Image (spheres, grey):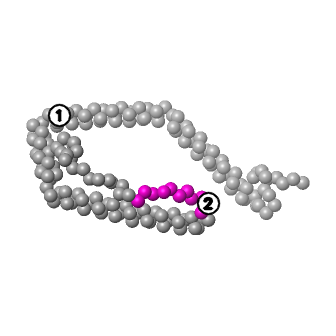
């Protein structure tokens, strides 16, 4: 007699309760799928999507109008000009240049440590899995940021 793989007919060693549980779980999955499909395809869901899209468009238009209004405000324009002046003064400051160089150096050191950590993790992973599933990608060990260039007020590279 051939083996019967139908879950409705229990195998030797498989009791009827297990088969009933499998059948009910399968039925529940099918019912959940049907419920989700019906919900996604319902007219009410489509109307909610249309309403939401319309609300987002209206909100976007209101935000754009408010931004235009703010940009035309003399107080905002004065604050923007003061901000530009402060940024210009900060760029010219030796302290700002020193801070920038320190940050660049710190990030370069952090990148170097991260490269070492990634290499160590990849090598440990390769040892554990036998090395057959990991692809090694070469990592350049040069500074990822390159040379620091000071910009003038218009965002152009200076001397």
- Element under disc 1: helix
Is the residue 28 above or below the residue 124 in the image? above
Q: Is residue 51 magenta?
A: no
The location of residue 33, given as percent across then percent down, is: 59, 43
Query: What residue is rendered at 57% in x and 64% in y?
Result: 126
Q: Which residues are magenta?
A: 131-141
Nearer to me, 40 or 119? 119
Mark 2 vs mark 1: in front: 2
- Element under disc 2: loop
Q: Main secondary structure of the magenta part?
A: loop
Query: What residue is rendered at 69% in x and 54% in y?
Result: 22
Residue under numbered circle 1:
69
> Is the Cβ of the residue at disc 2 closer than 8 Å to that at disc 1?
no
All told, the count of numbered labels is 2
Q: Quadrant of residue 111?
A: bottom left
Could you tell whether 12 is left or right of 67 in the image?
A: right
The location of residue 29, given as percent across then percent down, is: 62, 48
């Amino acid at each position: 007699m051939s083996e019967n793989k139908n879950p409705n007919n229990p195998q030797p060693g498989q009791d009827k309760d297990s088969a009933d549980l499998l059948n009910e779980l399968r039925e529940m999955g099918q019912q959940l799928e049907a419920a989700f499909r019906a919900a996604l395809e319902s007219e009410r869901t489509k109307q909610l999507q249309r309403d939401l899209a319309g609300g987002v468009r209206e909100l976007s238009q209101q935000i754009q109008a408010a931004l235009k209004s703010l940009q035309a405000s003399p107080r905002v324009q004065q604050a923007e000009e003061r901000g530009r002046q402060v940024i210009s003064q900060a760029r010219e400051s030796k302290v700002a240049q020193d801070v920038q160089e320190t940050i660049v150096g710190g990030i370069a050191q952090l990148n170097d440590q991260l490269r070492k950590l990634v290499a160590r993790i990849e090598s440990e992973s390769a040892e554990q899995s036998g090395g057959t599933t990991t692809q090694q990608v070469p990592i350049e060990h040069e500074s990822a940021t390159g040379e620091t260039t000071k910009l003038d007020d218009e965002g152009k590279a200076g001397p």
